[in-house]
Amino acid sequence: QQADYDDNNIFAKMLNGDIPYHKVYEDDKTLAFMDIMPQAEGHVLVIPKQKAVDLADLQPDYAAAILMTSKKVMQAQRQVFEREGVIQMQLNGSQAGQTVFHYHVHLIPSSIHELGRH
Ligand code: 5GP
């Protein structure tokens, strides 16, 4: 069962301006920032400005906005890091490894071999 949205989760606090972060991109529906514990250089997280625990909650307009922001971020990563490989990853539920319960997409300049996944 999915938990209720916690207004005190760390990404909610970022959206409220209560804790600092390194901003990459922002628009009316999304925010992108650097991951504090990057799995590879240039690891970015994209979140909606909507109270969504995970994918199950995401509204269609925010889902579309998340993808368009992810495209922008990925294109910037390809330019900055001069590599084609960018992994888009998104975990739903603690069983899947989700640790912050505000929906977020990982964009990681990497290859599947470097991340140790097969
Ligand atoms: P999850 O495992 O939930 O998909 O990923 C949560 C991600 O959030 C992790 O990659 C973790 O490093 C990142 N993270 C956790 N706390 C903070 C924080 O305070 N600031 C930033 N920028 N990233 C965070």
Image (cartoon, rainbow, N blue to C red):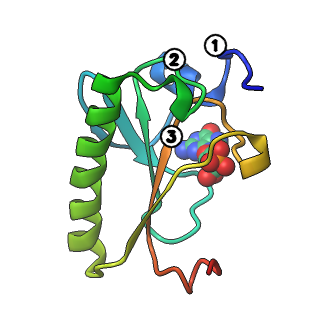
Amino acid type at circle 2 is Lys
Local crowd at mark 3 within 10 Å, few (<14), some, or many (≥20)? many
Determine the image quadrant of residue 59: top left
Residue 72 to residue 42: above or below: above
Judge whether residue 70 can be spotted in this image: yes
Camera-nearest label, 1 or 3: 3
The secondary element bearing badge 1 is classed as loop
Q: Is the C-beta of the residue carrying label 3 under 8 Å from the nearest atom of ligand 1?
A: yes
Dot 2: element? loop
Tell me the SS state at disc 3: loop
Q: Report x, y in % for residue 33.
A: 42, 44
Q: CA distance from mark 1 to mark 2?
A: 8 Å
Which image quadrant: the C terminus?
bottom right
| Mark with earlier residue (1, 2) | 1
For the residues labelled 3 and 2, say whether their Cβ atoms are less than 8 Å apart.
Answer: no
Residue 102 left/right relative to 111: right
Please name the residue that numbered disc 2 is placed on: 51
**Residue type, label 3:** His
Q: Position of residue 24 (x, y in %)?
A: 32, 46
Identify residue for label 1. Answer: 7
Q: CA distance from mark 3 to mark 2?
A: 11 Å
112 left or right of 7? left
Reading the image, the residue beneath label 3 is 104
The Cα atoms of the two marked residues, 1 and 3, are separated by: 15 Å
Question: Of the residues under marks 1 and 3, which one precedes in the sequence?
Answer: 1
Q: Amino acid at mark 1?
A: Asp
Q: Is mark 1 within 8 Å of ligand 1?
A: no
Q: Residue at x 79, y 47 (%)?
A: 95
Dot 1 alpha-carbon crowd within 10 angstroms: few under 14, some 14 to 19, many 20 or more: few
The residue depicted at 68 percent of the width and 16 percent of the height is: 6
